[in-house]
Amino acid sequence: MRKEYQQIGFTFVFIIGFLYLGKLLREFFIAQSLFEELPADLISGSIVRATILLVLIYLVYKWKLQRFNGLVKGNKPESWQVFLIPMIIISFAFFSNWAIYTNAGILLLTLFIISVTLVGFIEEIAFRGIIMPLFIKLFHKNKQVLYWSVLLPASLTTESHFEC
């Protein structure tokens, strides 16, 4: 079996496995009366998502995918506008639920923001940072390399929508 297939499979199994561990950690926090349900959910989710993100970044370097991700030495970000759309969406969500957020404690609000923000980074690094470059490596001899390398990870993203 090609190395890229194994790496794609590993990425999926790792993420899904860690998300399951997050649910177990949440249940542990609640069972031990360490936290109430919402804080337990946010804390366990943040811990698991941060761990997944760190491992995915490690895999980008281990599997030598930095060039695909723009992580080569001396490469500067091209544009700050890529952060504009997510910030607008987060702002709309925040202001549309103003009463909920203003009544929440600062700790819960901070955990919520961290937890939600990590989901986007995980998805981008997993699908666009690891899986798409691996498909590019798989289909590099095909004339439609970019077509397949974009279409397949995108279809996996829409199909999986695993709950981070």
Image (cartoon, helix red, strand yellow):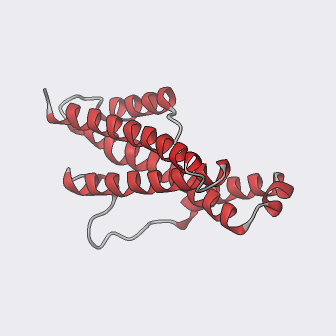
Q: How many marks?
A: 0
Asked whether 7 or 19 is in front, the reply is 19
Residue 116 in sight: no
Q: Is residue 38 left or right of residue 156?
A: right
Residue 134 in sight: yes
Q: Residue furthest bottom?
A: 74
Asked whether 31 or 55 is in front, the reply is 31
Q: Where in the figure is residue 24, as x and y percent of width and height?
A: 47, 41
The residue located at (37%, 37%) in the rendering is: 17
Look at the picture and state if 3 lies above or below 76. Answer: above
Look at the picture and state if 9 lies above or below 75. Answer: above
Q: Where in the figure is residue 83, as x and y percent of width and height?
A: 57, 61
The residue located at (69%, 52%) in the rendering is: 89
The residue located at (33%, 51%) in the rendering is: 56
Image quarter in which the N terminus is found: top left
Q: Is residue 4 left or right of residue 133?
A: left
Q: Is residue 113 left or right of residue 140?
A: right
Asked whether 61 or 41 is in front, the reply is 41
Question: Quarter-wise, where is residue 55 in the image?
Answer: bottom left
The residue located at (82%, 54%) in the rendering is: 100
Q: Where in the figure is residue 72, as x and y percent of width and height?
A: 27, 65
Question: Quarter-wise, where is residue 73 in the image?
Answer: bottom left
